[in-house]
Amino acid sequence: MSEKVSFGDRVVAAGFAAGWKLVPLLPERPTAAVFRFLADRVWSRRGKSVRRLESNLARVTGLEPGNRELSELTRAGMRSYFRYFHEVFRLPSMSSEEIVRRTHVIGAEHIHDNLAAGRGVVLALPHMGNWDAAGAWLVGVGHPFTTVAERLRPESLFRRYVAFREGLGMEVLPLTGGDGHNFGTLASRLRKGRAVCLPAERDLTKSGIEVRFFGATTKVPAGPPLLAVQTGAALLPAVVYFVGDEWGIHIHEEVPVPEEGTRQEKVAFLAQRMTEVFEKGISEHPEDWHMLQRLWLEDLPR
């Protein structure tokens, strides 16, 4: 069957195609200003995504809805989110050397040392900052990696996004619609002493692992902790954020697998410890957390 594509999907796909084609041809500062303007317009209209971001940030910061500080933080969050897309359009035209030079990394040795010893690493990240630029940095310092991408609609947009990430040096597996062996492929890469990078703070499916996150229950993907338990790879939580016009990455120390307990208990333990690292990073850089969807179970419709 052919894919049913809505008018809105076509518009989004056309916008991305134009962005990748036109934005690199224009000066950086004026185009960045345009994206900030668009972010402010979206924020001022207070649509569903903006209200959800504000609600999520209220839980993170403890600020009350309607608080001016929370409103300004949400505005900064939308600017950060739109900055990500502006940079996505520019990244293919940037050299690997420039990306590495503009990236400030804390804890890079946790990656380098494990991979140099032939041990795979699972980098688990929340949706923060510019994770594509972080991936380009990892490739640029000599560590190509494998990741999994959500299947976007329409298919043409998904293919463009995959091509964009492959162009940065990543191996991209589709979350759905592939050969159905993603976990086995990721485990194989790790056993060969390679790196895997996965988003890790939202999975509201039946397979998600329940954790406490900013004082309430949510679910995170089982994949990162389960891969560490199954393969012996190092689970390294990482936080990505913006530093002025450049990028920051904090690679945290390995979350070690407990020696005792069932596989399920070990996975649950790793998931909770990983989430606690994310809490710290999000608390330090709340404006760069791009969570515009429901996250906590109590916020879901009954």
Image (cartoon, rainbow, N blue to C red):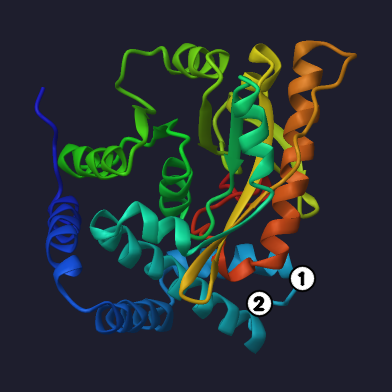
Secondary structure at badge 2 equals: loop
Nearer to us of marks 2 and 1 is 1
Q: Is residue 93 above or below residue 170?
A: below
Residue drawn at (75%, 57%), measured in percent from left and top? 280
Q: Is residue 235 above or below residue 298?
A: above
Q: Which residue appears farthest toward the left when viewing the image?
A: 2
Q: Is residue 198 left or right of residue 136?
A: right
Residue 224 coordinates in the image, percent (x, y): 61, 28
The quadrant of the rendering that contains the N terminus is: top left
Residue that appears at 58% across and 25% down: 223
Determine contact: label 2, label 1, CB under 8 Å: no
Does 143 sit above or below residue 65? above
The answer to which of 222 and 257 lies nearer the viewer is 257
Q: Secondary structure at mark 1?
A: loop
Q: Who is closer to the viewer here, 56 or 23? A: 23
- Image coordinates of residue 83 in percent, x first then y, are 39, 69
Q: Residues within 10 Å of mark 2 (few under 14, many from 20)?
A: some
Residue at label 2? 65
Q: In the rendered image, which quarter is residue 99 located in? A: bottom left
According to the picture, the residue beneath numbered tag 1 turns out to be: 62
Mark seen at residue 246: none
> Can you give x and y, in whole percent of width and height, for residue 124 in the image?
60, 38
Residue 150 picture location, percent across and down:
37, 37
Tell me which residue sits at (42%, 54%) in the image: 133
> Is 58 situated left or right of 245 in this image?
right
Q: Nearer the viewer, residue 180 or 115?
A: 115
Residue drawn where x is 48% and y is 11% of the image:
184
The answer to which image quadrant residue 114 occupies is top right
